[in-house]
Image (spheres, rainbow, N blue to C red):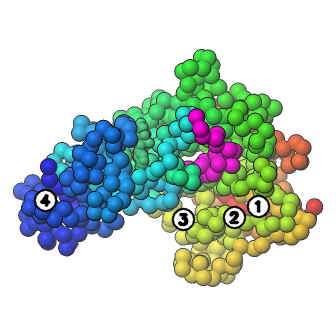
Amino acid sequence: MHCFPCFSSPKNKKSSTTNETNENNEPRPPDRRRTEETEETEQSEGTSLKIFTFRELATATKNFRQECLLGEGGFGRVYKGTLKSTGQVVAVKQLDKHGLHGNKEFQAEVLSLGQLDHPNLVKLIGYCADGDQRLLVYDYISGGSLQDHLHEPKPDCEPMDWTTRMQIAYGAAQGLDYLHDKANPPVIYRDLKASNILLDDDFSPKLSDFGLHKLGPGTGDKMMALSSRVMGTYGYSAPEYTRGGNLTLKSDVYSFGVVLLELITGRRALDTTRPNDEQNLVSWAQPIFRDPKKYPDMADPVLKNKLSERGLNQAVAIASMCVQEEAAARPLISDVMVALSFLSMPTEDGIPTAVPILSFKDKSMSIALSRHDSNLVSLPPELATEDDKSSTSSGEESSLDSEKESVSKNKYKKKHEEEDSSMESDDGSDSNSEHEKDQDSPPPKPIDEKNQAQSLKIKYRYSWEDIDVSDERLSSKSSQKSNDESTSSRYDSDRDQEEKEKEEEEEQEHSHIEHIHSSKTDDDQSVYFDNDDDSGDDNGASLHRIKSEVEIDSIKE
Ligand SMILES: Nc1ncnc2c1ncn2[C@@H]1O[C@H](COP(=O)(O)OP(=O)(O)OP(=O)(O)O)[C@@H](O)[C@H]1O
């Protein structure tokens, strides 16, 4: 077999062949002698992707020997291999020959997959397209999958502790947030599950198997898969997806919620060895979500007494929001990520040093971080340094804008820029350029003062909209509302009062369906659903986030 590179750098193109396309404008095989004799790995144009020869990969995997087989998934077999040229250990995914991918699809797919790069994604390092062979070459992740660690642990392995679980959830949320928010066009994962979350040696999670079906740009939440084939795994797939193949970013959020529930409970998403009413994890958990007293019973028994009840309550609350039946009511993964950033903070003597307090009141959900020691509370570095996220800590508008749910990435960016410029006129500072932003924006205001409770709140405002609302209406209305209300961070201690008054005003304007209350007192730190409202089952209404804002307060005790 010989290499059949689809793409090559201009330099390589010149040297490989003068007949790059045939009369049908299809790529021709390169000069056979070159690939056989030199075995030189090419670089794909415009990406860091390497184009491997089939021979290289056969050598790397000892001719795809059984002993190198890591497993077989929906797309084909995966082999562990070592690249002869560099010694790098890789995972080689040999795609099913009878799969969906034609040559063109494959080309488009690998090129866009090659652009994706995030510490919480398994990195695609190259590919091979040779005749009817299609192979993808990934970094090898040595620690096994979350599924292995959680559900099939080796007998000599300690069960994963609570903080590790929350750190895995946080890392996975960051990977997913990258796919949803940073990748352009956004990538819907489709098949997020514990077996697709690989762990490296220090338990850092890496999402694998993403983007094997690339999605075209759509209209935000309504993005559809190019393929109508319903994928996903039972137990993880969102109801709207399994029912009608309707795939959106929120379907991923649902699957994420299931993984979070697995981490919390130690139960499988689907476990046919359990009694009927306990086989499906979400169905089992739904009634418990409404009864916080039962939350401790939900926790993985191996964690007994080794987790904070507050942390558990918050994690369950996040999971319960993610697995809501109504896709539009699920939070954005970026919101989930922020909440988990706090839950995953290291603990002192098993007690988390900081616990987020989620409060759901009328149209707003707040995530507040409280701690009562003298250490600084600041956003985790990954949230504080990136441009989008720096806004959460530097007093600018939050990047967690409602519009990204309902408009395309480009539209979102445009909106973001507009708001940036409105921010500019508001506060007189120039925040347009990323570079300037990095240089000029003041560092996050320290909020630490001894004997003060510290609180960082990220508020998400939701409004009720008819479900059949058109995207245009949703986005323009939301946008208007979002623009009308300034989205700035405030540091002054009068903010709470102001906020309360504003909320009361807004309360009169909108009806609400569901409350989840959070009590801030130390002994009663509960989060619970309040179904006291008969508008709860309002037909044709759903929650849409219209605004988010960040505030960092120092609250005198
Ligand atoms: N980059 C990698 N590093 C290490 N092991 C990997 C890597 N990619 C996949 N694997 C392992 O290879 C096996 C097959 O993986 P694959 O993703 O193809 O299927 P799956 O996740 O088991 O099932 P599905 O296709 O339904 O998602 C799994 O055991 C997986 O953990």
Q: Is residue 85 left or right of residue 461?
A: left
Callout 1: 10 Å neighbours few (<14), some, many (20+)? many
What is the quadrant of the C terminus in the image?
Answer: bottom right
Q: Which residue is mark 1?
A: 456
Q: Which residue is mark 4?
A: 36
Contact between labelled residues 1 and 2, with CB atoms less than 8 Å apart: yes
Which of the marked residues, 2 or 3, is nearer the chain's N terminus? 2
Task: Please state which of the two labelled residues, at mark 1 or mark 3, is closer to the viewer.
Answer: 1
Task: Please state which of the two labelled residues, at mark 1 or mark 4, is closer to the viewer.
Answer: 4
Task: Please state which of the two labelled residues, at mark 4 or mark 2, is closer to the viewer.
Answer: 4
Kindly identify the amino acid type of the residue bearing the numbered disc 3.
Answer: Lys
Q: Does the magenta portion include 161?
A: yes
Q: Which residue is mark 3?
A: 415
Please report the residue visible at 64 percent of the width from the left and 39 percent of the height from the top: 159
Task: Please state which of the two labelled residues, at mark 4 or mark 3, is closer to the viewer.
Answer: 4
Rendering quarter of residue 34: bottom left
